[in-house]
Image: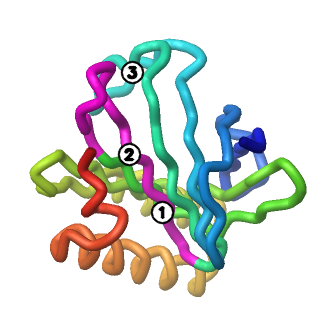
């Protein structure tokens, strides 16, 4: 499988995070990557993400969000974590996207919590998000919620 370098940025261009993943599938505008955490991460809502935790990552080159499916070490679904973001750019071996702060945490039973709306509101002012970015971010959140509530792809991939 091809190795992909994933880079996330804040709206002002600062790199936020980086990791390596493997390209699992490329179909139309959809890229599916498999990644393994190279270090232990402490996350306020997800708790400890252990070294070696597997994530399957779904990116669409024409959508304003991406979805991560986190698995327990046993292979069971831990959660989905959805990022509102500008559509990613995929060039050669690098996939990069601008993280727009709002997130959705989805439990295995597909109950969900919208996160960081306050951070999104602060960053609208801090980074002067254009009205079109604000509008597309809110539409992306609505689309994600519709997919979750209907149990549609990728939220029907529960294993």
Q: Position of residue 141 (x, y in %)?
A: 36, 72
Left or right: residue 17 compared with residue 131? right
Left or right: residue 39 compared with residue 156? right
The Cα atoms of the two marked residues, 3 and 2, are separated by 13 Å
Q: Is residue 62 magenta?
A: no
Mark 1 Cα shell of 10 Å, populated few (<14), some (14-19), many (≥20): many
The mark nearer the N terminus, 3 or 2, is 3
Mark 2 Cα shell of 10 Å, populated few (<14), some (14-19), many (≥20): many
The Cα atoms of the two marked residues, 2 and 1, are separated by 15 Å
Mark 3 Cα shell of 10 Å, populated few (<14), some (14-19), many (≥20): some
The residue depicted at 48 percent of the width and 13 percent of the height is: 51
Q: Is residue 64 magenta?
A: yes
Residue toward you, 52 or 97: 52
Quadrant assignment for the C terminus: top left
The residue depicted at 31 percent of the width and 55 percent of the height is: 104
Residue 79 visible to the viewer:
yes
Quadrant assignment for the N terminus: top right
Residue 69's disc is 2
Read off the magenta span.
63-79
The correct choice, above or below, for 11 with respect to 134 in the image is: above
Tell me how many marks there are.
Answer: 3
Question: Marks 2 and 1: CB-CB under 8 Å?
Answer: no
The correct choice, above or below, for 15 with respect to 155 in the image is: above
Q: Position of residue 114 (x, y in %)?
A: 26, 57
Q: Which residue is mark 1?
A: 84
Residue toward you, 104 or 159: 159
Residue toward you, 46 or 115: 46
Q: Which residue is mark 3?
A: 49
- Helix, strand or loop for disc 2: strand
The residue depicted at 27 percent of the width and 73 percent of the height is: 152
- Helix, strand or loop for disc 1: strand
């Amino acid at each position: 499988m091809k190795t992909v370098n994933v880079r996330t940025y804040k709206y002002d261009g600062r790199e936020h995070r980086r990791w390596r993943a493997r390209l699992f599938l490329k179909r139309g505008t959809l890229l599916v990557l498999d990644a393994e955490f190279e270090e232990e991460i402490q996350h306020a809502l997800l708790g400890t993400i252990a070294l070696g935790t597997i994530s399957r990552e779904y990116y669409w080159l024409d959508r304003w969000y991406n979805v991560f499916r986190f698995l327990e070490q046993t292979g069971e679904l831990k959660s989905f974590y959805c990022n509102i973001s500008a559509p990613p750019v995929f060039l050669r071996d690098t996939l990069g996207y601008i993280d727009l702060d709002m997130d959705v945490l989805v439990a295995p039973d597909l109950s969900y919590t919208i996160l960081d709306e306050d951070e999104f509101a602060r960053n609208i002012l801090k980074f002067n998000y254009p009205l079109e970015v604000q509008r597309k971010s809110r539409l992306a959140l609505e689309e994600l919620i519709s997919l979750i509530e209907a149990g549609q792809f990728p939220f029907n991939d529960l294993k």
